[in-house]
Amino acid sequence: MNLGGPSVESTDMQPATPCDAVIVNYNAGELLGRCVGALGEVQAMGRIIVSDNGSNDASLKALPSNRTVAEKIVLRLNHANLGFGRACNIGYTLTQAPYLLFINPDCIVQPDSVERLITVLEQHPDMGMVGPMILNPDGSEQVGARRTTPTPGRAFIKAFGLSRAAAALPGLFKDFNLQNEPVPTQPTDVDAISGACMLVRRTAIDQVGLFDEGYFMHCEDLDWCMRFRLAGWRVVFVPDAVVMHEKGVSSRSRPVFVEWHKHRGMARYYRKFFSSRYPLILMPFVMLAIWARFGAVALRHLSRRLMGVLSSPGAARG
């Protein structure tokens, strides 16, 4: 295993293989080891780059030590939480394969899923990235695995729960997430896939560029998908490639922090791609709606935390 720092980038490169993986880790615990262990069993897998954002838990100690997997691991220590996109970009510089799998540490690939994604990309040179069927631990399809473009109008519908009326007025109140739509039987073009797991063509990255590091966490995947499509690359959902995702493991202890960056990212996304499409007078209202929603969500999290403290046995004795 190669340890992080400048010496990592000067290590001898292994012979090219169909796929390298990039994992951004931040206190993912034992799930990181499970993720890397599953990737290590993938025949097509070359290097497994772990770009660690200054974790202070035992997750790095949980990395597999068996020789077959350990020889594939390259550990990059970033010594601080640099954000998801920047850590992905750092990991990318240590890859060499023609296909790159960007995957969260709380994901477990199913047997043959990576090879299936590679096959789809190899058969369709106009595809820039493909994403798998992402399942929750209970086996249900996870929100965000396949999406239409979250325009400000669609985001408003999602934020205020109006998508519940989609059954009565599907054309008016349709959600931008597609998990309630029938699952396609073949690879299908979508506007966006989930950044939790995406296989990307290196030559497409060379044209489009890396992740926008102006996002700290959340929405950088939407941004990347949008840029790929604007550059003429197809973004495709592959339903028979399956990945399990225990969502939000490293974010549960800091929900307000996560929500802040999620809403900040969405504001950046809308300014970047929709400012020229909407009347100038409308965008301030879009921004106001985003931050009003953040205030409501943050207040809910803080209220739950306060109620938990007040209802704890220690508080009752006091």
Image (cartoon, rainbow, N blue to C red):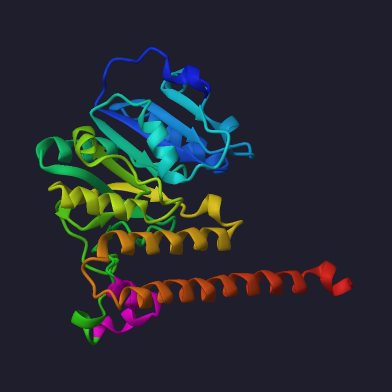
Percent x, y of residue 8: 46, 20
Residue at far front of view: 280
Instruction: Name the residue located 36 percent from the left edge and 62 percent from the top edge.
Output: 143
**For residue 130, above or below residue 34:** below
Residue at far bottom of view: 168
**For residue 303, above or below residue 132:** below
Whether residue 81 appears in magenta in the rendering, the answer is no
Rendering quarter of residue 44: top left
Q: For this rendering, which residue is in front, 211 or 280?
A: 280
Residue at far right of view: 318
Q: For this rendering, which residue is in front, 23 or 207?
A: 207
Relative to 236, 223 lies left or right: right
Rendering quarter of residue 267: bottom left
Q: For this rendering, which residue is in front, 10 or 248?
A: 10
Relative to 164, 300 lies left or right: right
Instruction: Name the residue located 21 percent from the left edge and 66 percent from the top edge.
Output: 182
Rendering quarter of residue 192: bottom left
Relative to 304, 138 lies left or right: left
Part of the protein shown in magenta: 152-167
Overall secondary structure of the magenta stretch? helix
Look at the image and tell me in which quarter the C terminus lies: bottom right
Percent x, y of residue 158: 35, 74
Percent x, y of residue 230: 17, 52
Percent x, y of residue 80: 57, 38
**For residue 94, above or below residue 138:** above
Residue at far top of view: 12
* Res. 143 visible in picture: yes
* Res. 238 visible in picture: no
Instruction: Name the residue located 44 percent from the left edge and 18 percent from the top edge.
Output: 71
